[in-house]
Image (tube, rainbow, N blue to C red):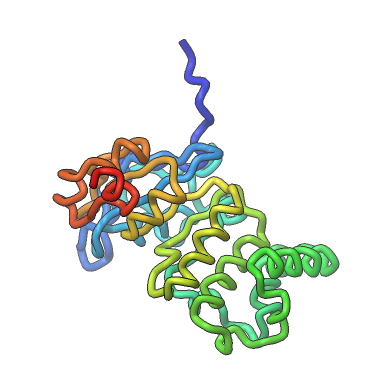
């Protein structure tokens, strides 16, 4: 009987990565994110989450194994197309905001891809409205609050209309109001997503599936309900039950 589930948009097959100094950051990682689904990549600091994310649009290349995006293996020949499909948002928004104005920051990607100016202008304004910063278009990114900069960094990716969003700790260092704004924003997008986080409540609220990464290895993966309710598994890898699960058991 055939598998009628959606095909993976991202698939990692036995991926290992060793940094130039010899540090083994990923070990035989197998992982898939299916179209229309969202996956939480969970693990303590130093687990290898950020290293894994950098493989998804070709910034890093596997020492062993393969990474495929929308059926294409990530290679020198495909990396430009892959980067159109994968919208990677770094943990530090200042890694993505470097132009004179917020408008220019968001326009940079599509202009660099050769889109016509009228289409870029339309996309930039749509992205600014989507993140709630339409009035800040002419302001320098570094004049925005940290929460606004996190949303602005997301807009620099949304403007490219990627097939999948890859978010590295999207709520890290946000105050409660900004954290809630980010959660609601990501939820409203309804996009296939891979979210690396150690915020278990974010994982529970935003993701249908989850995988635990520790010491560069995928320890467990499955549905949100299977992974995020397994207290022994989470505790062993420096994680805790989401608040919603703890409350339900109280």
Residue at 15 percent across and 44 percent down: it is 232
Residue at 53%, 83% in the rendered image = 145
Left or right: where 192 falls relative to 119: left
Residue in the image at 43% along x and 66% along y = 171
Q: Nearer the viewer, residue 165 or 21?
A: 165
Answer left or right for 49 relative to 81: left
Number of dots carrying numbers:
0
Residue that sits furthest to the front in the current view = 250
Q: Nearer the viewer, residue 243 or 29?
A: 243
User: Which of the 4 image quadrants contains residue 151?
Assistant: bottom right
User: Foreground residue, 202 or 84?
Assistant: 202
**x, y percentage for residue 63?**
31, 52
Q: Quadrant of residue 35?
A: top right
Residue 205 on image: x %, y %: 43, 50
Residue lying at the far right of the rendered structure: 118
Q: Residue furthest top?
A: 1
**On the rendered structure, is 102 left or right of 182?**
right
The picture quadrant where one finds residue 215 is: bottom left
The answer to whether residue 238 is seen in the rendering is yes
**Residue 64 horizontal/vertical position (percent):** 31, 46
Q: Is residue 153 above or below residue 18?
A: below
**Residue occupying the point 57% across, 56% down:** 83
Tell me if I can see residue 79 in this picture: no
Q: Position of residue 71 (x, y in %)?
A: 53, 37
């Amino acid at each position: 009987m055939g598998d009628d589930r959606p095909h993976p948009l991202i698939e990692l097959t036995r991926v290992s990565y060793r940094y130039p100094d010899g540090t083994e950051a990923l070990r035989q990682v197998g992982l898939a994110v299916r179209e229309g689904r969202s996956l939480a990549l969970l693990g303590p600091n130093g687990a290898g989450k950020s290293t894994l994310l950098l493989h998804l649009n070709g910034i890093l290349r596997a020492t062993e194994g393969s990474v495929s995006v929308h059926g294409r293996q990530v290679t020198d020949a495909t990396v430009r197309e892959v980067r159109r499909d994968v919208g990677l948002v770094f943990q530090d928004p200042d890694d993505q905001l470097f132009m004179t104005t917020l408008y220019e920051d968001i326009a940079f990607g599509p202009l660099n891809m050769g889109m016509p100016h009228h289409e870029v202008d339309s996309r930039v304004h749509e992205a600014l409205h989507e993140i709630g910063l339409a009035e800040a278009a002419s302001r320098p990114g570094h004049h925005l609050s940290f929460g606004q900069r996190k949303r602005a960094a997301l807009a620099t990716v949304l403007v490219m209309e990627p097939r999948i969003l890859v978010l590295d700790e999207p709520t890290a260092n946000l105050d409660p109001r900004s954290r809630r704004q980010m959660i609601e924003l990501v939820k409203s997008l309804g996009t296939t997503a891979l979210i690396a986080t150690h915020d278990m409540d974010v994982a529970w609220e935003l993701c249908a599936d989850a995988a635990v990464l520790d010491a560069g290895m995928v320890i467990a993966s499955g549905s949100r309900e299977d992974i995020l309710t397994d207290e022994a598994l989470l505790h062993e890898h420096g994680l805790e039950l989401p608040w919603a699960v703890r409350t339900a058991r109280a």
